[in-house]
Amino acid sequence: MTTLSQPLIVESSANGQIPPLENGDRLTRPEFERRYAAMPHVKKAELIEGVVYMPSPVSNDHAQPHFDLIAWLGFYRAATPGISGGDNGTLRLDLDNEPQPDAFLRILAEYGGQARVD
């Protein structure tokens, strides 16, 4: 099996337009963000280890446990000083990973957390 040391990037199409995101594309985070911004109709796309993932719309089989997870994390956040959370927010983990998790918690900076919001 061949592995790539650098993601493949097509900067623009022949007509100068930004190429669309496609499931399986290998991109850098800046190129992923550029293409994602050019596709406002796309509701969810993630970059995991330099590979684009575009999940299909969710069903009730996903929605109900998601709702329960949000409630559980909300109760935890309310009882735990120094944390914040979110739902479907984009997280920039490093240059090859930009997931959009169903939910997340982060430690606030004033409590020693290293995450920042931009």
Image (cartoon, helix red, strand yellow):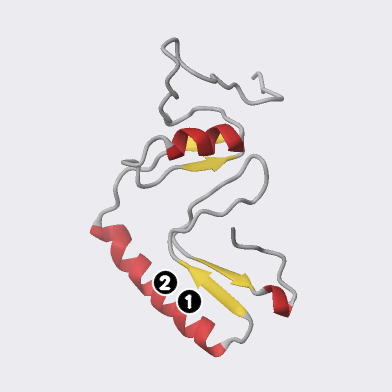
Front in this rendered view, residue 20 or 104: 20
- In this rendering, the answer to whether 23 lies above or below 65 is above
Q: Circle 1 is placed at which residue position?
A: 73
Tell me residue 9's x, y (percent): 58, 22
Residue type marked 2: Leu
Front in this rendered view, residue 50 or 30: 30
The N terminus - image quarter: top right
The residue lying at 24 percent from left, 60 percent from top is 60
Mark 1 to mark 2 CA distance (whole Å): 6 Å
The residue lying at 71 percent from left, 25 percent from top is 5
Q: Circle 2 is placed at which residue position?
A: 69
The residue lying at 43 percent from left, 64 percent from top is 87
Front in this rendered view, residue 1 or 102: 102
Tell me residue 35's x, y (percent): 47, 33
Tell me residue 64's x, y (percent): 29, 67
Name the quadrant containing residue 20.
top left
The C terminus - image quarter: bottom right
Q: Is residue 47 left or right of residue 61?
A: right
